[in-house]
Structure formats: structure tokens, C-alpha cells
Amino acid sequence: MHGLQRCKTKFTIDLHPSKIANVAGGVRARLSSLLLRYNDDLDGVLLSYTNVRVLTKQAPILTYFPFVRVEVVADVVLLRPKIGMHMVGTINKVGVDYIGLLLLGFINVSLAADQIRSEFQARPLDHAWVSSKTPQHRLEVGALVHFTVASLNHNGQFISMAGSLLQPGTGAHGFTAPPPAATAQKKQKKQKKQKQQQQGAAADVPVEQQQQGEGKARKKKKKDQAAADGQPAGVGAAPAQQQQQQGDGKAHKTKKKQAASAQQPAGGDAAPAQQQQQQAPPLVQQQQQHPAAKKGKKEKRKREGMEAGVSAPPPPPQKQQQQLDTAAVAAPLPAASPGKAKGKKRKANAAADAPVAEAAAAAAAAVSPVAEKQQKKKKHKKG
């Protein structure tokens, strides 16, 4: 029923000196005197109390009265009726122009004739009010009646109220329909509860089941793609795109091998043809220019030695031969085309050896005059 409220309340109680020997008993006696009475401080009627605890450790004595003031805390149940609330009372009196009710067995409620719907007609002989629409709907002594609070009246510690049966949802118990507002609220609560249950059911689905569903969807997609490409849709079959990438990689590797075999010379230890072509001109030019440059340096050293009275010693023949051999080994060979025969390879090797032979001959021609001069000097010294 509306209007009932449970709360924890603090009381200030003045105990008579005769209650000092039993403070707990004196507190309970004071709280019991407040039961079923309207209290302005509580703004309602005290119906019950439990769990009483005395907070005061040292109680002061009032100046002009020999009472001891203590503070107490208790759990209480209060009735706080408000105008417009729906409540239920029991009929105890039926008159021609009113109906009397008892609320909770001790609060008087009166229903005046102008607060009763016109469908109800008073029947003094039956001591009841009967509905013209539904004859079974009777307001008689002992029946439970749903009403709304029209007004409140409290004089001192006693309270009374006036009720009304004009609003929907009022009347005898079992013949009343809930008011439209209450019905709408119930529908909203029901819908909200259903949404919460649906959300909770969706949240309770295990993560493993969700992952399994996603895996099945991926497998189905792969099967569809394989069927569209004309490939078998087995579990171990790779997608068409992956197979195409593997085929492209294999073709690329085959092309690389063919190019490497085509560029590799007959000896097998030379560099690729492209590097040989890039490096060949500088080395050949260096070999062709080496004898003339070396000869010019020798002559310059000879002139400087003659001026200083000392001739510069020429490089030993072994070192010259090593330089010639190094130049001959480092000389690149022209690349042989993959489609040529062995005869073309021999011609290419001969063409590559020609510059080396010319460079060796030029070096020997440059060295021979220097050796002859050194021998003449030695004979002159001995003589």
C-alpha cells in the first residue's frame, strides 16, 4: 500500500527520575506512547519501532525540571498519506449519503455521496451501494474498497481523511481496473525488463561460440571463392589468390636462374656480363696507358737522378711481372651470348686476350732499355 515508509529515526526523550534505574524500559515506554499517533516532527503516524539504541553516555538534568534528557535511535515504520494516493480500507458503516471506512484498522475515512460515482445507488434495506452497470459490484459492510485520498485532517495526535471513488481504478476489490497511468507505467517497466533480459542473454553467449561462428563464416566464404574459381573446395585447399601469388613467385625465380646462366661466362668464375661490360673499358684503358705513363715516369726519374748525381733504382723485374699478371687476371672477358656456340666463345676469349698481350709487350719494351743502362753502369764501375 502506498504511504508506508521504513526509516531510521533519532528521538530525544526526557525520562522521569523514577526511570533512571531502568533507562531502556523508560525509553520503550515513551516510544510506545507515540504509536498510532500523528507526529508533526515525523510528518506521519508511527506504526512500529525496533532496534532501539541509547546514544547518550552521560545524560544532563534539566534546570527547571527534574527530567533526564537522552538521545535514542530506532528503526521505525511510518504512515505518511498524501492527497491523491491510492489506499485500501474496510467498510464499517453504510449510510444513505456516505460510506465509512477504517484504514489499517484505526484511521477513519469517510466517502461522501458527492465523491461516489453515479453508477452506484444506495440501497438502505440491503445496507449497501450497488453498481447499475455490474450488479455484483456491491459496496457493503466488510468489503475492501480502493479509494483515493481527497483530504487530510489531523487534530493533535489523531488523524482522519476523506476519500473519493470518482477516479478510475477505485471501487470494491475485484471490480477495479488499474488506472491508465499505472497501466502505462507497468507496460514501460515490462518492456524495459524484456530489453534488459535480451541484452543479458546476448552478453551471456560464450566467446568461444562467437569465434566458432566467425570461423564457419570465413570457411564458407573460402569455399564460395574456390567454387567460383573452379578449384576444389576442400578444407586444405588454398585460396585462388594465394596459389596465383605462388605461381608468380616460381616464374620469377625461373627467370632469374635463366638470366644468371645466360650471363655467366664459360669459365664459371668471372663476374656477370653486365658488370664486365661496365668495368672493362676503364681496365683496358688503364692497361693501354700503363706502359707509356710508366716510361714517362722512368725518364723523369732518370733526369732528376742525373741532376742529383744519383739515379733512382728501377722496380725489380719480379714486381713488374706480378703487376702484369694481375692486370691480365683482372682483365674482364666479354660476355658470351646464351644462344652462341663454342666457336664464338673461343673468339671472345681470343679478343679478350689480345689487349693483355699488347700491354705485356709494351711493358717489356719499356723495361729493356732501363735494364741495358743498368748493366752498362755496372761494367763501368768494375772497369
Image: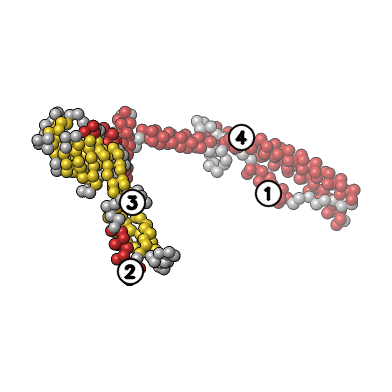
Marks 4 and 3, how far apart in space? 116 Å
Occupied quadrant, residue 269:
top right
| Dot 1 and dot 2 residues touching (CB under 8 Å) | no
Q: Residue at x 23, y 44 (%)?
A: 108
Residue 61 picture location, percent across and down: 42, 66
- The circle drawn on residue 277 is 4
Q: Residue at x 36, y 33 (%)?
A: 240
Select label 4 or label 3 by which is in front.
Answer: 3
Q: Which residue is mark 2?
A: 18
Select label 1 or label 4 by which is in front.
Answer: 4
Residue 143 picture location, percent across and down: 15, 41
| Dot 1 and dot 4 residues touching (CB under 8 Å) | no
Q: Nearer the viewer, residue 382 or 110?
A: 110
Provide the secondary structure element on which disc 2 rests.
Answer: helix
Residue 98 picture location, percent across and down: 20, 36
Q: Which residue is mark 3?
A: 39
- The circle drawn on residue 42 is none
Label located before the other in sequence (4 or 3): 3
Marks 1 and 4, how far apart in space? 25 Å
Q: Residue at x 35, y 48 (%)?
A: 43
Q: Amino acid at mark 3?
A: Asn
Q: Amino acid at mark 1?
A: Gln
